[in-house]
Amino acid sequence: MKKVNIGGVPEHFNLAWYLTLKEGEFKEENINLRWHDYPGGTGAMCKGLRNGDIDIAVILTEGIIKDIIDGNPSKIVQTFVQTPLIWGVHVAQNSSYKTIEDLKGMKAAISRYGSGSHLMAYIHAQNNNWNLEKDLDFEVIKDLNGAIKGLTEGDADYFLWEKFTTKPLVDNGVFRRIDNCPSPWPCFVIAVSEDFIKSNKKELKTILNIINSTTKEFKDIPSIDKTIANRYEQELSDVQEWLSITEWSQDLIDEDTVMHVQNELFKLNIIPEVVSYKRLTLNL
């Protein structure tokens, strides 16, 4: 049986993987797919792909594009979630910050450099016409638990993270959300190390076929909203809202979108150059 390591954030977006694993669908095809949670997000997964800890990552579009340009020997083989990610801009419940203008020049908590929370802080700053050199400052906090500690203890002032994941923390009075910042492109893609692609193209196609058949019908699974609410400790109404605005994809990310992401990252001095579509993607 072929062992394959895959990584992703332990969030509701990836429940489809859990369901297919639980049903034993990969083992039926002689594939031992091992899921690894990455609470540290995209930066940690980029490192995992580079080190060979994982073969496949379900990862933020902007983060993996940046890291491939920076030398990560991987390729994007498919879009996973077609819709944008809604990033909430959070502060500690008891902080004095009330508006976005209050955060100008303050310290943003980020999981790590090159992560989604880092890159989206630039997008958010640009959206609000901040000076990207003077008005941005960062504190590395590793993950969501680190952000709770960092914001509560004052080591950082604000934090961007997916708004439905953090909603329980807002409801419980740990964070206050003072703004939303949608990513201007599809949020999650599937990236695979080039070494794995070279030797395992057949297995990779099988894995994608299995997950795609699940995501195509994900919203039609009976009581899926209740399952998500229970598993991820979210309010049912929040889950229903999230399901209503989220669309999965079974196709390779298109060239126009890839160039749009690159142009934005280049404009923000996050990447040193804009590269070809073929350098970043592979059509299986």
Image: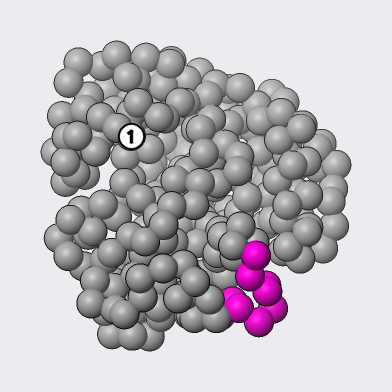
Q: Is residue 68 left or right of residue 111?
A: right
Q: Is residue 94 left or right of residue 269?
A: left
Q: Is residue 284 left or right of residue 114?
A: right
> Is residue 9 positioned above or below 210 on the image?
below
User: Residue 184 location, x and y as percent?
Assistant: 60, 43
Q: Look at the image and say whether residue 250 sits in the magenta stretch.
A: no
Q: How many marks?
A: 1
Going by the numbered disc 1, the residue's amino acid type is: Trp
Query: Residue visible at 66% across and 30% down?
Result: 253
Q: Please give the range of residues in magenta.
A: 129-137
Q: Is residue 44 visible?
A: no
User: Residue 92 location, x and y as percent?
Assistant: 29, 73
Query: Residue visible at 16% across and 41% down?
Result: 235
Q: Is residue 142 left or right of residue 144?
A: right
What is the quadrant of the N terminus in the image? top left
Nearest the viewer among 144 and 246 is: 246
Q: Look at the image and say whether residue 131 sits in the magenta stretch.
A: yes
Q: Which residue is mark 1?
A: 242
User: Residue 212 location, x and y as percent?
Assistant: 47, 20
The quadrant where residue 13 appears: top left
> Is residue 177 positioned above or below 80 on the image?
below
Magenta stretch, main secondary structure, is loop
Nearest the viewer among 123 and 200 is: 123
Query: Residue visible at 34% across and 20% down?
Result: 218
User: Residue 188 location, x and y as percent?
Assistant: 52, 40
Query: Residue visible at 37% across and 14% down?
Result: 217
What is the quadrant of the C terminus in the image? top right
Query: Is label 1 in a helix, a strand or a loop?
Result: helix
Q: Is residue 273 visible?
A: yes
Dot 1 crowding, Cα within 10 Å, few <14, some 14–19, many 20+:
some
> Is residue 46 positioned above or below 83 on the image?
below
